[in-house]
Image (spheres, helix red, strand yellow):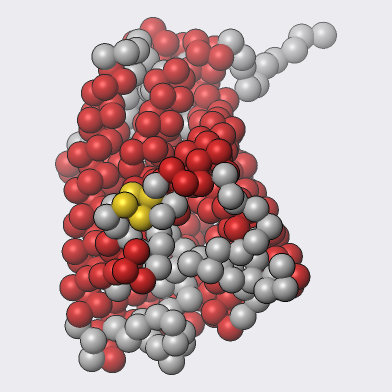
Amino acid sequence: MQSINGADMSFVIFSAALVMVMIPGLALFYGGMVRSKNVLSTTMHSYAALIVISVQWILIGYSLAFGPSIGGFIGGLNFSFLKGVGELPNADYASTIPQLLFMAFQMMFAVITAAVISGSFAERMRFPAFILFIILWSTFVYDPIAHWVWGGAGEKAGWLKQLGVLDFAGGFVVEINSGISGLICAIVLGRRKKAKPAPHHIPMSMLGAGLLWFGWFGFNAGSALAMNGAAVNAFVTTNISAATGAIGWLLCEWILFKKPTALGTLSGSICGLVAITQGAGFVSPIAALFIGLAGGALSFGAIAILKYKLGYDDALDAFGCHGVSGIWGCIATALFASKAVNPNGADGVLRGNWSLLGSHLIAMLAIAGFAAFMTFAILKLISMITPIRTTETEEINGLDVSLHGEEAYREFSM
């Protein structure tokens, strides 16, 4: 117990709570962008992920992701049901906080990743199918990929960690993973009857985006797992990238459509946050300026142009935001990473190290391919057990009433 640092422990507890705040933030952000008849079903996805994945994580999820490595591909079941996970640190992950706290912090990452995917199939997935999906997806997609990138140490680390990839707070594990999986979900479920409905409550989405921005400080800075310089750098780069992400989106919107929108501003900031997630503790604040700016612009192109040309219905742009900006963040980290910023990281291409870019491209292709294949397989398996897609009548009436028997907004007569 003498290695436990009280300040670090307090910092990570607070950071875990901040990541949990991202769940209601995402619920509001997504909820405001759907039609009023689907707002409850959409927000339920985020809260259901918090409930279901919290249980899955302590039973087997944490062990599969962070248990002793089996060939670098998956963790063993040594930590299942939190066996041996207690007040002592696990030096492979964090030497100054209890392993139980590390588990709780990582649990929030697993929760938010499952919740993000729900944006791709909003307004058209049945709730029982959703519950089955997030359980199977977290177990067979998220947990293995988390182990590849973050699991173990040294020769007993995950295979991508041994390859030397850098992922400070989840660019690979959370963003690319959820974005690619969301794209597959959108394609498999097909288009809604009305594929581009107007958001019913933009102020709700703006409040949600603000909570996401706030929570992202815990997401990124907290990933240092200690009160140190890396945490401070991650805090600063997170805010800068969010700001320039909004600018990048607005510039594109202003040039093409002549009007900067409120929803576009906040969407751009989220894209900037996604783009910096991977390199938050490895790149400088000046690099973060460019990372966020490009992230906002690239995701704008994917959401405002590419999606409609290709015809897939990614309802709330899980792929356009998290997938596209996550892929850019993977490349940008390999370009801008600097050991002068974080000695525990690596130098990137701009400092003469091309091998980091090669490792990141291998990781990106492996994660995208695995996530796409497994997501497709899971959806097909679920379709053999229960219907995935809502009926036309349910979609017309709205999922709030059809699936949950509730209305978000009800008029009362005197």
Question: Residue at coordinates 19% horizontally, 57% vertically from top-left?
Answer: 365
Rendered image quadrant of residue 190: top left
Say above or below: 304 vs 199: below
Say above or below: 397 vs 241: above
Which quadrant is the N terminus positioned in?
Answer: bottom right
Name the spot of residue 153 as percent of width and height, x first: 40, 68
Rendered image quadrant of residue 98: bottom right
Say whether residue 346 is visible: yes
Residue 304 versus residue 16: which sits nearer the camera?
16
Question: Residue at coordinates 51% horizontally, 51% vertically from top-left?
Answer: 109
Residue 286 versus residue 375: which sits nearer the camera?
375
Name the spot of residue 336 as percent of width and height, x first: 34, 82
- 49 sits left or right of 67 in the view: right
Residue 373 versus residue 125: which sits nearer the camera?
373
* Total numbered labels placed on residues in the image: 0
Say above or below: 51 vs 125: below
Rendered image quadrant of residue 337: bottom left
Which quadrant is the C terminus positioned in?
Answer: top right
Name the spot of residue 10 as percent of width and height, x first: 73, 65
Question: Residue at coordinates 48% horizontally, 32% vertically from top-left?
Answer: 34
- 82 sits left or right of 371 in the view: right
Say whether residue 297 is visible: no
Name the spot of residue 132 as percent of width and height, x first: 41, 24
Say above or below: 272 vs 190: below
- 216 sits left or right of 292 in the view: right
Question: Residue at coordinates 19% horizontally, 48% vertically from top-left?
Answer: 369
